[in-house]
Structures are given as structure tokens and as C-alpha cells.
Image (cartoon, rainbow, N blue to C red):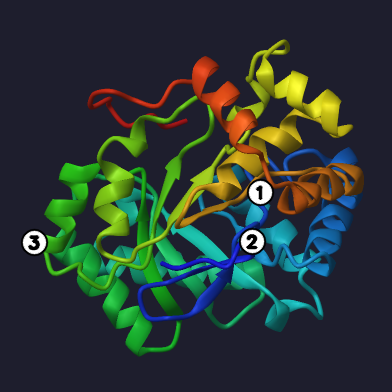
Amino acid sequence: MSTDGICVTLPNGESVAKLGQGTWEMGERRAAREAEIAALREGIALGMNVIDTAEMYGEGTTETLIGEALAGLRDEVFLVSKVYPHNASRRGVAASCEASLRRLKTDRLDLYLLHWPGSIALEETVEGFEALRRAGKIRHWGVSNFDVDDMEALVAAGGSACATNQILYNVARRGPEFDLLPWMRARDMPAMAYSPIDHMRLPKRSVLDEIAQSRQVSMTTIALAWVLEQPGVCAIPKAGNIEHVRENRRALDIRLTNSERAMIDAQFAPPGAKRPLDML
């Protein structure tokens, strides 16, 4: 789980870019398609080569867009997709994975996640993931939106090979810091933060804006930089155009001062007690 500021490390020792790209809602508007493809390709060129998607996103239309965007670039990307919980039986996982591979125009996923806890036994999902891994269809598997009790249940179900947990985490939603992130760090398991700028819901006037003005960058760049400073956390912000991608990339070059961190903590306080895990 160690990080040099640019990468996080998976439990097996493989390094993954600390800043990647999310794709929720991409591919759903014809007029935006060209700009979205260009944004993804620009991000890859800038080293943001973790691309996250899911079969749920546009019911496959997002994966189709990514398949087009990755033409000639597949080997440069750490590609992530997610399976619906209701498709997470051993046979269902296999069928969903094959469908995602077809839409993404690839022969393997680098990481395959269970999108959120469901009603199908975790033992069966783990068996399905491991079968896919042995077949070379996926390289790693993990989960998303799992709280501590869910993670404990996963381990008890034979899921100790889980590579990551993708969670909603940002400066305004710090609940995982109380117990979930420490639980994961103790097991050298990185967290993957989705909506790291809170889906653009952060307050317009805040210490983030004050810091951003002093540094002549955007408020969202500061919010993202804060997430990227957290140990064992990578982030997958979405950007639908090239300029937004470049704005996100600037966050990797920001080093907050102790004073700035204290200002952020004063307005966006860390949790003092257990909070239910947020999810979008």
C-alpha cells in the first residue's frame, strides 16, 4: 500500500497510478462523445492511465465509448470495470465479464469489482472472480462500496485476495477515515476514491476556494490534491473535456502546507465517531 506520491501499491506489489479517470455518465450524450474520447486519451497521455467504468454505466454504453477511446492504447491502461450485485453469481460474473470485454474491445480486465454488496453469497462471487482470474479474463478483483463489516464478511467468505475497495471519499465525506481506511491500511489494501470532488457539490465559498485563489488554481484542483495526499488512496475523477483533464492533473503537483491542511480540517472536520458509508 506504500506510495511515492504518484502511485499506490496493490497487495501483490503491483504499482498503480494514484490519479486515474472515472467515466460515470460518459457515452450517454451523442454531442459529447468526441470531447469525452479526446479527454480520456489526453488523460492517458498525462499518465492518468487507470480507467474506471462499470456495466451499470449507461447499461454498457460507457464501456462501448471506452472501447473506442482505447483503440491502440489498451496496453498503456489499467482498465477497471464493475459487475452488478444481481449478476454476481459464479455464472453471472462470467457472463457479465464477457459482455464487458466485448464492449471494451479487450481480452482482459486489469481489475474487476463487485459494484456494491448484494444478496448473492460472497463465497459464490469470490469463486466466480477467481475462476475469471485463472482463465486470464481478469488480473485482479475487488469490491466497491463495502464498509468494515462488509469487508470482514468478504474475508470470512474466502476473499482475502481482494485488491481494493472503491469508495465515495473526499474532503466533505471523510467518514471512512474513522475505521474503514485504517482497516484497509492494516492489510496493505489501497482505497480507490470515486467522486473525489464530491460530484461538484462542494461549497462554492470555503477554505478550498481561499487556498485555490492563493495558488492560482481551481477549487476542485485543491480538493483533489487533498484526496491524493491521503496515504493508500488513489482517485478517479471524471473529466468530460481536455481542459478539465489537465485541471485534474495539476492536483498531482500540489503539496498542501501544514497550515492549509489545518484550515481544511477546521471546515471539513475528520470523523470523531463511526458514520455509515456514503455512496452515490
**How far apart are the alpha carbons under marks 2 and 3?**
30 Å
Residue at the extreme front: 259
Crowd around label 1: few <14 · some 14–19 · many ≥20 (10 Å): many
**x 35%, y 38%: residue:** 177
Q: Residue furthest bottom?
A: 135
- Distance from disc 1 to disc 2, alpha carbons, whole Å, reads 8 Å
For residue 156, the mark is: 3
For label 2, count other residues whose C-alpha is less than 10 Å away and answer few (under 14), some (14-19) or many (20+). many
Identify residue for label 1: 23
SS at mark 1? loop
Residue 89 position, x and y percent, is 24, 61
- In the displayed structure, would residue 145 be above or below residue 106? above
Q: Are marks 1 and 2 in contact (CB under 8 Å)?
A: yes
In this view, which residue lies farthest toward the top?
205
Percent x, y of residue 242:
90, 49
Identified at 64% across, 49% down, the residue is 22
- Residue 78 percent coordinates (x, y): 60, 72
Q: Considering only order in the chain, which callout, 3 or 2, is on the residue closer to the N terminus?
A: 2
Residue ID for mark 2: 51
Mark 1 touches mark 3? (CB < 8 Å) = no
Name the image quarter holding the N terminus.
bottom left
Reply above or below: 102 against 179. below
Disc 2 residue type (three-letter): Ile
Residue 210, percent across and down?
76, 19
Q: Residues within 10 Å of mark 3 (few under 14, many from 20)?
A: few
The mark closer to the camera, 1 or 3, is 3
Residue 146 in view in this figure: no
Label 3 sits on what residue type?
Answer: Ala
Q: Is residue 18 above or below residue 265?
A: below
Residue depicted at 58% across the width and 32% down the height: 261
Three-letter code for the amino acid on which mark 1 is drawn: Thr
